[in-house]
Amino acid sequence: MATSKMTKFKVGDEVRIDNKGKGRIKKLLENDEYTVQIEGIDFEFDCTADRLVLEVEVGSGVVKQTTDQVTTGAGQRHIRIDNSDIDDFVNKQANKNTLSKTFYDLKLLRQFLSLENENREIYQIPPQELCPLLCKFFIGIRKQDGSNYEPSSLRGFMSSFDRQLRRYDYGYSVVSSVEFGKVREVLTAKQRELKEEGKGNKPMKAQPISDDEIETLWEPGQLGCSNSDSVINTLWFFSTVHFGLRGSDEHRSMYWGDINLCRDVSGEEYLEFDERQTKTRQGTNPRDVRAVKPKMWSNSENLERCPVKTYKFYKSKRPASYCEPSDPFYIATHTKQGALKGEDQWFKKQPIGVNKLTQIMKKMAIAAGLPDDKKLSNHSARKHLVQKLNDQNIPPNQIIQITGHRNLQSVNNYSHMYLMSGHLQTGHVTILTDFDTRRCIRNTH
């Protein structure tokens, strides 16, 4: 079986340069040279093929493939994987928020263990020694300001410790093993004590945004198409209340190809969302998919607040070469908007910053002068969606088709809302919503 000496790249291939920085093939040149765009910045340069390493997508993760590992014939079906790559691949597929929380919680535990003159990792400590240490930890742990954690935070600590022990095949579970029964008793007692102190009532819980507050966001231009930031704000808001996306992570993981512009049999345009990985559907069960793809319909009665029109406008202001299906949906804005001419693009060829997307509702609320005594966050828009449907007596089993919740009980945790906006469709009902006309429900049977 012959082995090719050099990988032949094609336009659009994602590569690593010198096994370090990432880039994308933009042009094919002569003599095995390519024009490569550096990931995250608008910069291109020419380099030879021997400096490039092809990245092959497996699911939503990435596995490295070097140029001397590509073979002809049947060998192309198999990629060489080193043992060191296995853990790296698994970690890439893990929920980033879960990894971050686990890291933080273990850091707190290590600080406590050092005070107890214990320098071993928790998976190296036998259960009979680890159990009393964890009991002391849960009784005495405090925030930096000396106040107590919420009861749910303590439960989160236990889950993090259990994940770490499972990862290293510890053989015992903090959550279920008899050897750690005392830890669970201490945790229950501590949670009762905190509840008596008034903890556990979620004072920082996000509140749903109201119709009047949404109208306030439109009036000063926080929503609309007056500038690049308002376009991003509007697309984020529409995608949240029509597709049921969670505040930031599910938005940031969206690609341009995840939203498709379609027409129904009557010729009316709508946007359809093709869900990838989410908090409740992480890809481990191939059959666990939404029964109905969420849709966002055009608003012909109020074009200034039409989702389809906003989407088309956004596309016209994006770099034309940055509208491939694998390109990020939300991209960064030019900081000096005033210097741009009418024909210039408003956006850069790089993903939007995570902090900007995470704080989008909070910044809109401040800029629009909304009362600061109300807890508004990105989750407020999702709560607006869920409670709106609930107040219109839409059955929970239909609500979860839009929101993507895994079970009906999750929907019942939302309460008290107002009226909402553009078509929201499931297989059984269409919820006609418009911020001005306040339409309600129409059966599609």
Image (tube, helix red, strand yellow):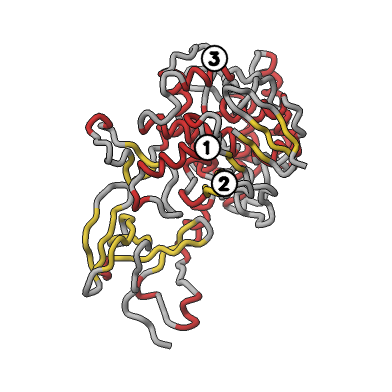
Question: Which kind of residue does numbered mark 3 sit on?
Answer: Lys
Q: Which residue bears the numbered disc 2?
A: 273
Classed neighbour count for the residue bearing mark 2: other residues with Cα under 10 Å, few (<14), some (14–19), many (≥20): many
> Measuring 56% from the left and 28% from the top, which residue is drawn there?
381
Q: Residue 379 carries which label?
A: none
Q: Which residue is drawn at 24% across and 55% down?
A: 44
Whichever of callouts 2 and 1 sits on the residue coming sooner in the sequence is 1
Can residue 165 be spotted in the picture?
A: no
Disc 1 to disc 3, C-alpha distance: 27 Å
Q: Which amino acid does label 2 sit on?
A: Phe
**Percent position of residue 279, x then y:** 59, 42
Residue 427 shown left or right of residue 380 in the figure: right
Badge 2 marks a residue whose secondary structure is strand
Between circles 3 and 2, the one closer to the viewer is: 2
Foreground residue, 374 or 220? 220
Is disc 1 surrounded by few (<14), some (14 to 19) or many (20+) residues within 10 Å?
some
Mark linked to residue 101: 1
Q: Which quadrant would residue 227 be assigned to in this image?
A: top left
Up-down: is 320 above or below 108?
below
Local SS, label 1:
helix
Tell me which residue sits at (29%, 47%) in the image: 41
Q: Where is residue 247 in the image (x, y as percent from the top left)?
A: 53, 33
Please name the residue that numbered disc 3 is placed on.
Answer: 374
All told, the count of numbered labels is 3
Query: CB under 8 Å between callouts 2 and 1?
Result: no
| Dot placed on the residue nearer the N-terminal end, 1 or 3 | 1
What is the C-alpha distance between the residues marked 2 and 1? 29 Å
* Residue type at numbered disc 1: Lys
